[in-house]
Amino acid sequence: MPTNRLEAADLWAAYGVKEAETFVVADKYGNPFHTAKEPVLNEKLGEVASHFRGVRKQLRKEVDAAQAAKDKGDVAAAIESLKKGFKLGLTGYSEAESAAKLYNEIVEDGRKQVKAAGKDSAKLDELARKYAGTEVEKDVTAARKASN
C-alpha cells in the first residue's frame, strides 16, 4: 500500500533524491510526476522570486500612495492608485490584502456618505465623481432613482 510521501520524515529518501538542487514536480497529494536536476529549472525559480519581489514592491507603492491620498481626503486619487495596484493581479501576499482592506474601507466610507447625502443631488453628483468606477457609484445611481 502506498504511503503519503509528503508526511515522510526524510523527503529526500521518499522521492529518491540523491543531490541538492533536484526538483520534484508532484500533485497536491505528493504523487511525483517529474524529477530533474536541470539548471534551467533553477534559473526559472530565481526569475519567479525576482519577478514577484518586483510586483510586490510595485503594489506596495500603489497602496502607500492610496493611503496617503486617502489621508489627505483625495478619495478619487486613492481609488486610482488602488486600481493601478489591482491591475497587477497579485493575490495572497500581505500587500494585496492591504490593498483590498483599504479599498473596502474607502467603499464603506463612501456608502455612509451616500446615505448621509439622502436626496441632495449636488452631494450625490460629487460622490459619483469621487467614487467613479466603484460600487459606491452604483449606490449613488440607486439613491438617485429612489429620490425620483
Image: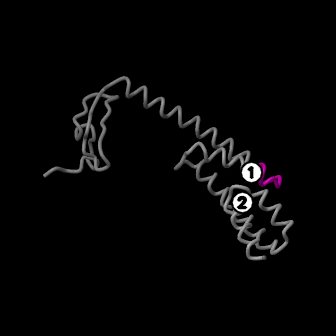
Query: Is 86 on the left or on the right of 26, as rendered?
Result: right
Give residue 61's position: percent from left, percent from top.
68, 41
What is the chief secondary structure element of the magenta stretch? helix
| Element marked by disc 1 | helix
**Quarter assignment of residue 18:** top left
Residue plotted at (71% across, 59% down): 106
Q: Check the image and name the residue furthest to the front.
A: 148
Q: Earlier in the sequence, mark 1 or mark 2?
A: 1
> Which residue is identified by label 1?
78
Residue 41 has which mark? none
The span from disc 1 to disc 2 (Cα, nearest Å) is 9 Å
**Quarter assignment of residue 32:** top left
Q: Which residues are magenta?
A: 68-79
Residue 106 has which mark? 2
* Mark 1, other Cα within 10 Å: few <14 / some 14–19 / many ≥20: many
Give residue 3's position: percent from left, percent from top.
19, 50
Q: Amino acid at mark 2?
A: Ile
Work out whether residue 145 or residue 47 is closer to the camera in this orientation and state it: 145
- Mark 1 in CB contact with mark 2 (< 8 angstroms): yes
Q: Amino acid at mark 1?
A: Ala
Against 75, residue 65 (above or below) is: above
